[in-house]
Image: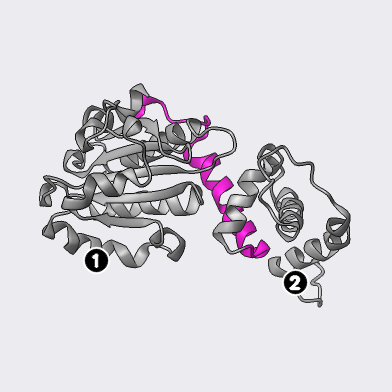
Amino acid sequence: METVSTEPAKSELDSNQDLLAKDEAKAQAVVLQDDGGLKDSSEAELKKISLMRTLVEARDPSSKEVDDLMIRRFLRARDLDVEKASAMFLKYLKWKHSFVPNGSVSPSEICDDLAQEKMYVQGVDKKGRPITVAFAAKHFQNKNGLEAFKRYVVFALEKLCSRIPAGEEKFLSIADIKGWGYANSDLRGYLSALTILQDYYPERLGKLFIVHAPYMFMKVWKLVYPFIDDNTKKKIVFVENKKLKSTLLEEIDESQLPEIYGGKLQLVPIQDS
């Protein structure tokens, strides 16, 4: 007959706390070797990076493959709460293994979305962050549905992240809503893209300029806005048409600004960047 334990099962939270407690003393003495990327981290943040790494590696050994900068981005996304950041990171790993098992999205998987040529990448802002421009009026739901669009979003984000130079972690985005109509309205797609950005690519968005937003678009925006986390909201700027170039020039040199906004660079489709 099977023996039934009379002791209460240990919760995952308890286990996490045990791991943190065991590593606390060690973390006090740890001085992380700085590769240049963590130089702006405080001593308290460095200790939490060490604590979080111990916790997530115990839960998923594949965590050993990621660098401290990624650990730090998840920590910062959860206001340095190690438990919350670890849960967020482990959720990301599970998603990554299932959604992108080969490590990347092939252009052949997202032909319809690429054919719409709705995202472009060129130039860098004054901080060295790559610039992407997305045209909402070029987005239409395609026959392959939501899953294909989500793969397109991952493809685009990976492209952007691959262009981020050493010493920088973010990109700048311009969302151009000119010509947008209800035919382009895709609430499920917008929310899916937002979820992927916030949950799986935290602390990657540096700033989002929304330009040429028509009145109709604001109705959809009101539906999306409650799902945007507070950290992301702080990075979003709606730009008045009459102040478009001057506002963009605050962050981007004219030599790096797209021609369509009064700059000198031509747009390059993201698949060709």
Residue 93: x %, y % from top left: 58, 46
Badge 2 or badge 1: first in the primary sequence: 2
Kindly report the distance in space between the C-alpha atoms of the residues bearing marks 2 and 1. 44 Å
Dot 1 crowding, Cα within 10 Å, few <14, some 14–19, many 20+: few
User: What amino acid is found at the position of numbered circle 2 in the picture?
Assistant: Ala
Residue at image x 35%, y 56%? 236
Q: Nearer the viewer, residue 158 or 249?
A: 249
Dividing the picture into quadrants, the one containing residue 15 is: bottom right
Q: Is residue 108 visible?
A: no
Q: Residue at x 52, y 34 (%)?
A: 101
Determine the residue positioned at 18% across, 41% down: 140
Please state if 50 lies on the left or on the right of 37 as rendered.
right
Tell me the SS state at disc 2: loop
Q: Are marks 2 and 1 in contact (CB under 8 Å)?
A: no
Q: Residue at x 24, y 44 (%)?
A: 245
Q: Secondary structure at mark 1?
A: helix
Quarter of the image that includes the N terminus: bottom right
Q: How many other residues sit within 10 Å of disc 2, few (<14), some (14-19) or many (≥20)?
A: few
Magenta-colored span = 80-109
Q: Is residue 68 magenta?
A: no
| Quadrant occupied by the C terminus | top left
Numbered badge on residue 162: none
* Residue 18 in view: yes
Residue 37 % position (x, y): 66, 41
Of labels 2 and 1, the one closer to you: 1
Q: Would you name the residue on which mark 1 appears?
A: 222
Would you place residue 122 above or below residue 235 in this image? above
Type of colouring: one colour
Q: Amino acid at mark 1?
A: Lys
Label count reads 2
Residue where numbered disc 2 is placed: 9
Left or right placement of residue 29 versus residue 180 in this view: right
